[in-house]
Amino acid sequence: MQTARDPGTVRILGIDPGLRVTGFGVIDVRGRDLAYVASGVIRIPAGPLPPRLRVIHDGVSEVIAQYRPALAVAEIVFVNVNPQSTLLLGQARGAAITTLVAHGLDVREYTALQVKQAVVGHGRAAKSQVQAMVQRLLALPGVPSTDAADALACAICHAHAAALAGAAGSRGMRRGRLR
Amino acid sequence: MQTARDPGTVRILGIDPGLRVTGFGVIDVRGRDLAYVASGVIRIPAGPLPPRLRVIHDGVSEVIAQYRPALAVAEIVFVNVNPQSTLLLGQARGAAITTLVAHGLDVREYTALQVKQAVVGHGRAAKSQVQAMVQRLLALPGVPSTDAADALACAICHAHAAALAGAAGSRGMRRGRLR
């Protein structure tokens, strides 16, 4: 269901890709105001890789169709201690980002450090601190799951970066897309 | 351009994903007969990851639209000595396979060992031996590039595996898809 949105509002989709669970979070941004729209996780069953990537593709496509974000944000991941896990994560991340760009969405990337700094105020924050701050910033009634919180944190990070970049004026916002 | 195909012919698309160059190769298989259809590479410019994954998506989509394969084959990759390269390769591979499954194609995976054994006869073959055998098996006028040869080798590997699996009869073939 799509509701009419204020033209000054920008809807941002944050994605936290993983091969077992891919989190997503959607927020509406108007100037410095953030409003929670939705969040959740796509659960990927075990099995051969191609059908698993298809689950990510179909789930992300469904989120895009349902919420129609103006742009997407993903965290830049770093190599894992386990090389096999790094490869699997890379493939999941490739699936999610490919689905986003295939739908014509710009995808902005931020490091975990940038996301934590934007949401908590420092880059060494624990997962629980990110969850608590996401809950507070979006006035959620409960603590979001870690996967959903990470995805929402990505969206918040971009909203902050865009607000700072556009502090002198709202030209970027008026054109319906954050720059 | 799509030409009418014999109903007993199965068209296989082999993909060799990479973030700088993604190779592809298309063959037609009828029983034990292999016929070269096309091969080439998708070159991906440097820059931020999301647009690069989009180039892979758009290139693979174009190959699918042009040649309309019945199924696709990709090599199972292993972790690289460089973890960052492993992550990049994983993302490129995720992009290519996601594009294939998003188009409704089954994607079969084989290890490099299986591909080399199928094409050259042993798993320790050098790249130049793979290129030479692909040239010979498909009666090509010249040696294919390594990326195109690897993609064609994947397709040949699946054709051999399917021919062995269906050696007792051609039931799988008559249904228009190798099993």
Image (cartoon, coloured by chain):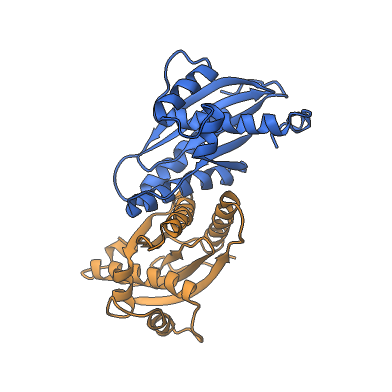
Chain colours: A blue, B orange
Check the image and name the residue furthest to the left.
B168
Q: Residue at x 59, y 56 (%)?
A: B55
Q: Horizontal placement of A13 versus A126: left or right?
A: right
Q: Is residue B154 shown above or below B60?
A: below
Q: Give residue A66's position: percent from left, percent from top.
A: 54, 29
Q: Give residue A132's position: percent from left, percent from top.
A: 45, 21
Q: Is residue B28 shown above or below A25?
A: below
Q: Nearer the viewer, residue B179 or A155?
A: A155
Q: Nearer the viewer, residue B35 or B125?
A: B125
Q: Quadrant of the C terminus of chain B?
A: bottom left
Q: Is residue A54 visible?
A: yes
Check the image and name the residue furthest to the top.
A141
Q: Nearer the viewer, residue A139 or B10?
A: A139
Q: Give residue A72's position: percent from left, percent from top.
A: 58, 37
Q: Horizontal placement of B136 versus A117: left or right?
A: left
Q: Is residue B175 visible?
A: no
How many marks the image carries: the answer is: 0
Q: Give residue B71's position: percent from left, percent from top.
A: 41, 59
Q: Quadrant of the N terminus of chain B?
A: bottom right
Q: Residue at x 54, y 69 (%)?
A: B41
Q: Is residue B17 shown above or below A55?
A: below
Q: Quadrant of residue B120?
A: bottom left
